[in-house]
């Protein structure tokens, strides 16, 4: 089968031929219907120095995956060949307190996990291939009615990550609240919708690209702004001088973090999701009082079930540009150039 593999750090991945894996006991082989093209992959193969992650090479990229059950190993029940499924990508030990609650992103025994601090396409073979071997059936989530693997694939990360980030701020997203989403790409276009679908807060979306802002408007953002448009002043006007209750930064560079802190409200939340490498200076007068700042990584399995349910009820729309597996390198180039809106999905 074809697989888009990372053979070395700081090197372009290549499409190669590898054997179709066989599912062992408890494992599931998924025929890939869609694999999302995430900006994190660009960070992984362009920026991560050797030794940064405890992962062995080579491995196949692709951590946003959905498809159909192809075959199951001994002892797997409830998953039949042909069933449409999404794959929960963070693969922990399955037995620690966090994993037992479905929060495998923060596995407390990473040495007992199939790969430390990773999962599908992050240290272990992922879904940029014809087939994906899922090491444990618990990571395979049947798709609810009305969802197909191409639109479901981005929900497993571009949907799940902002859902987790927004969900932990739900109590602050009241009917009088405002959320600011910075960066309306793969993650951000779903972040806007997660706020609209699950809270009564208003949404201000910020992006450098007019086409991203146009998408944000179409998906329900109340106000859309470019960083140069006096964002802090507009947010203050929109909120009677109070500022944003919740800011989710899906870029995370110096510029966007400074913007995030400048629009946030006293007692608000500032959540850093983007891996843009920026820093946020913290000191007594540098930011609003009692602003909580946090980073979040991906989301939990129960949250993935909730995201899929929202999409199946028509409350989340994934804006998808399809690429064949043979054109996967082009999909990453387009992502890097910033000429995509929503999410690129590779459809083997
Ligand atoms: P993307 O390229 O699809 O979207 C990024 C968006 O940000 C684009 O629309 C771009 O125009 C916009 N942007 C860039 N610079 C900007 C600026 N200075 N001001 C405003 N907007 C700007 O990327 P994506 O796949 O959505 O990923 C976004 C970030 O989130 C990446 O850094 C990625 O690695 C990270 N990520 C984090 C997690 C996590 O678990 N924390 C999960 C997935 C992705
Ligand atoms: Zn990702
Ligand atoms: Zn664990």
Image (cartoon, rainbow, N blue to C red):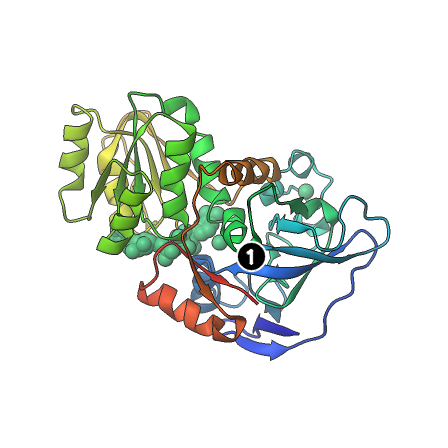
Beta carbon of the mark 1 residue lies under 8 A of ligand 2:
yes
Q: Residue at x 50, y 70 (%)?
A: 324
Residue 257 vertical position relative to residue 126 in the rendered view, above or below: above
Q: Is residue 44 visible from the viewing direction of this image?
A: yes
Report whether 339 appears left or right of 137: left
Q: How far across and how far down the image is residue 237, in percent? A: 14, 29
Q: Residue furthest right?
A: 74
Report whether 4 appears left or right of 141: left
Residue nearest the observer in this picture, 195 or 57: 195
Q: How far across and how far down the image is residue 175, in percent? A: 32, 21
Q: Residue at x 31, y 63 (%)?
A: 338
The quadrant of the image that shows the C terminus is bottom right
- Which residue bears the numbered disc 1? 63
Secondary structure under tag 1 reads loop
Where ligand 3 lies, by quadrant? top right
Q: Residue furthest front?
A: 146
Q: How far across and how far down the image is residue 169, in percent? A: 42, 29
Splitting the image into 4 quarters, where does residue 236 fall? top left
Q: Residue at x 72, y 43 (%)?
A: 94
Q: Is residue 286 visible from the viewing direction of this image?
A: no
Residue 302 vertical position relative to residue 339 in the rendered view, above or below: above
Q: For label 1, count other residues whose C-alpha is less than 10 Å away and answer few (under 14), some (14-19) or many (20+).
A: many
Residue nearest the observer in this picture, 296 or 62: 62
Report whether 119 appears left or right of 199: right
Report whether 234 appears left or right of 56: left
Q: How far across and how far down the image is residue 238, in percent? A: 18, 29
């Amino acid at each position: 089968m074809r697989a888009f593999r990372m053979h070395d750090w700081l090197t372009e991945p290549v499409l190669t031929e590898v054997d179709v894996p066989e599912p062992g006991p408890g494992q599931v082989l998924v025929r890939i219907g869609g694999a999302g093209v995430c900006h994190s992959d660009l960070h992984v193969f362009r920026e991560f120095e050797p030794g940064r992650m405890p992962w062995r090479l080579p491995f196949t990229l692709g951590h946003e995956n959905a498809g159909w059950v192809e075959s199951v190993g001994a002892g797997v029940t409830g998953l039949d060949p042909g069933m449409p499924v999404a794959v929960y990508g963070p693969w922990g030990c399955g037995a620690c307190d966090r994993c037992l609650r479905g929060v495998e992103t923060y596995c407390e025994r990473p040495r007992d996990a199939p790969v430390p601090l990773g999962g599908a396409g992050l240290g272990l073979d992922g879904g940029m291939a014809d087939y994906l071997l899922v090491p444990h059936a618990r990571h395979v989530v049947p798709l609810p009615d009305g969802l197909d693997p191409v639109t479901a694939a981005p929900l497993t990360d571009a949907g799940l990550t902002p859902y987790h980030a927004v969900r932990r701020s739900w109590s602050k997203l009241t009917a009088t609240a405002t959320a600011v989403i910075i960066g309306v790409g793969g993650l951000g276009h779903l972040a806007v919708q997660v706020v609209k679908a699950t809270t009564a807060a208003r949404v201000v979306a910020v992006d450098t690209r007019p086409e991203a802002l146009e998408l944000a408007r179409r998906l329900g953002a109340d106000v859309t702004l470019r960083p140069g448009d006096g964002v802090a002043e507009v947010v203050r006007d929109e909120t009677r001088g109070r500022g944003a209750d919740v800011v989710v930064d899906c870029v995370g560079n110096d510029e966007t973090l400074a913007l995030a802190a400048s629009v946030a409200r006293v007692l608000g939340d500032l959540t850093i999701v983007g891996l843009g490498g920026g820093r946020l200076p913290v000191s007594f007068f540098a930011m609003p009082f009692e602003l909580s700042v946090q980073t979040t990584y991906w989301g939990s399995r129960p949250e993935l079930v909730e995201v899929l349910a929202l999409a199946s009820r028509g409350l989340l729309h994934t804006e998808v540009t399809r690429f064949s597996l043979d054109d996967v390198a082009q999909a990453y180039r387009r992502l890097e150039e910033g000429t995509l809106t929503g999410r690129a999905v590779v459809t083997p």
